[in-house]
Amino acid sequence: MYRSGTLPEVTLKWAQTIDGQLADDSDQSQWISGIEERRYTHLLRSTHQAVLVGAQTFLKDLCQLTVRDIDYDELQPARVIIDPRGRVLAALKDNPHLIISLQMGPRRTYLLTDILEDFEDIDEKFDSTKLIRISYRFNDFRQWLMGGLRQLSLVIETAENRRLNFLMVEGGATTLSEFLKAGLADRLEVAISPLILGGSRHRVSSGSLLKNVDRFDVESKEQLGADILLRYKVRKATSLKRVMI
């Protein structure tokens, strides 16, 4: 597949109910999927150099995004938080538990944000090797997202001496949708659990008309306990719609 610049290959991973809900309307998602599927998620993380979530998901769950529950003694994937509106930075000002969470473990956290101002009161609380803020600004969100991924690739290569070839995006629904809208999804790994929740707040969407959406081909399917995992790959003809910025 053609990749422009330093963009990594992107896998979108989520678990949903039969009716497409990633959480109920009270924001609860733990746990939609079963133990076997969650263990597989850790295995999948181990094949990516970084795992990304949106600011809202991080602030709600304080997710570590580490590889656990399997035999694994390699370098942990970097944790990436996409925070265009500066919600994590704002929360850090008076939340000591958040500061502790961001500094747990040996690996780094990368915060992608649109906030360019200095936060000296926050920066002085952190080990600079644990939280790395990447601030940049574009007028268009797709450009902002693509530019951020390019900068992230360069920063990780410099800070950790490893290439960001594979990025895994785990949520939430808004962040997954933004990657789809930007045409930045190479693969989907979707676990379908035998539940029906109803509701409308936590659904993945490309925000496009049927004639404009990316098309994905099924690569494989697998039963994981009570859940069914579907693996998709974007069609080549669809991927050619991506343009350089």
Image (cartoon, rainbow, N blue to C red):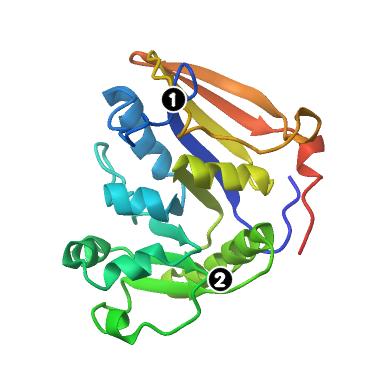
112 vs 236, nearest the viewer = 112
In which quarter of the view is residue 202 placed? top left
Give above or below for 209 relative to 166: above
Residue 199: assigned label: 1
Looking at the rendered image, the quarter that the N terminus falls into is top right
Residue at 53% across, 22% down: 230
Q: Secondary structure at mark 1?
A: loop
Give above or below for 92 relative to 61: below
In which quarter of the view is residue 143 placed? bottom right
In which quarter of the view is residue 55 placed? bottom left
Q: How far across and down, in percent of the image, does residue 114 sit? A: 53, 70
The residue type indicated by label 2 comes to: Leu
Instruction: Please name which of the two marks, 1 or 2, marks the residue nearer to the observer.
Output: 1
Q: Which residue is mark 2?
A: 154
Residue 227: assigned label: none
Query: Can the viewer see residue 63?
Result: no
Q: CA separation, marks 1 and 2?
A: 40 Å
Question: Earlier along the polypeptide chain: callout 1 or callout 2?
Answer: 2
Residue at 33% across, 15% down: 225
Q: How far across and down, in percent of the image, does residue 74 sit? A: 33, 52
The residue type indicated by label 1 comes to: Gly
Q: Residues within 10 Å of mark 2 (few under 14, many from 20)?
A: some
Give above or below for 63 relative to 14: below
